[in-house]
Amino acid sequence: MDDERRRAPRAPIELKVEYKRLNTFFADYTKNISRGGTFIGTEKPLSVGTEFVFALGVPGMPDPLRLRGKVIWVTPTHEATKANPAGMGIEFQYDATERQEKEAGVERLMLQELGELLTTRLLGRKPQV
């Protein structure tokens, strides 16, 4: 089911994610990432269609990577399984000037955390960073 929802191949990675919801800050974790989006494991997913800004804490980077995302699907707690945990699928949202910069940041993150071989396989080409 996950594969049908994904538009780009994803790789497993766990990074701390922070975001705000109704004046409350949340700290959850990513489970995987691609150039186009990520999955945030949480028992309190946002509603489908919600757009929000979140910060990815990346080891080795002095500041978190700030990204804008849109919830495109959720797995509520009552439907979660070990193979399909509770959380939300996030599609990165960019304007024309941000796209190249943010995609390059995600690509650098993938290269740093996953290595050149796996990153190349996931992107279908050699990393451009």
Image (tube, grey):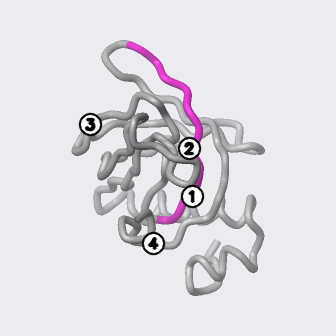
**For marks 1 and 4 on the same chain, the one whose residue lies earlier in the sequence:** 4
Q: Is residue 58 magenta?
A: no
The stretch in magenta equals 24-35
**For marks 3 and 4 on the same chain, the one whose residue lies earlier in the sequence:** 4
**For marks 2 and 1 on the same chain, the one whose residue lies earlier in the sequence:** 2
Left-right relation of 49 to 13: left
Q: Amino acid at mark 4?
A: Ala
Which SS class for mark 4?
loop
Disc 4/disc 2 C-alpha distance (Å): 20 Å
Disc 2/disc 3 C-alpha distance (Å): 23 Å
Q: Nearer the viewer, mark 3 or mark 1?
A: 3
Residue position for label 1: 105
Dot 3 alpha-carbon crowd within 10 angstroms: few under 14, some 14 to 19, many 20 or more: few
On the image, the x and y values in percent for residue 6 come to 40, 67
Residue position for label 4: 8
Most frequent secondary structure within the magenta stretch: strand
Q: Nearer the viewer, mark 4 or mark 2?
A: 4
Q: Amino acid at mark 1?
A: Gly
Residue position for label 2: 65
Which residue is drawn at the image coordinates 49% and 65% (left, top)?
A: 35
Q: Amino acid at mark 2?
A: Leu
Which residue is drawn at the image coordinates 41% and 28% (left, top)?
A: 44
Judging depth in this view, the residue of 112 and 14 nearest the camera is: 14
Which residue is drawn at the image coordinates 57% and 40% (left, top)?
A: 56
Which SS class for mark 3?
loop
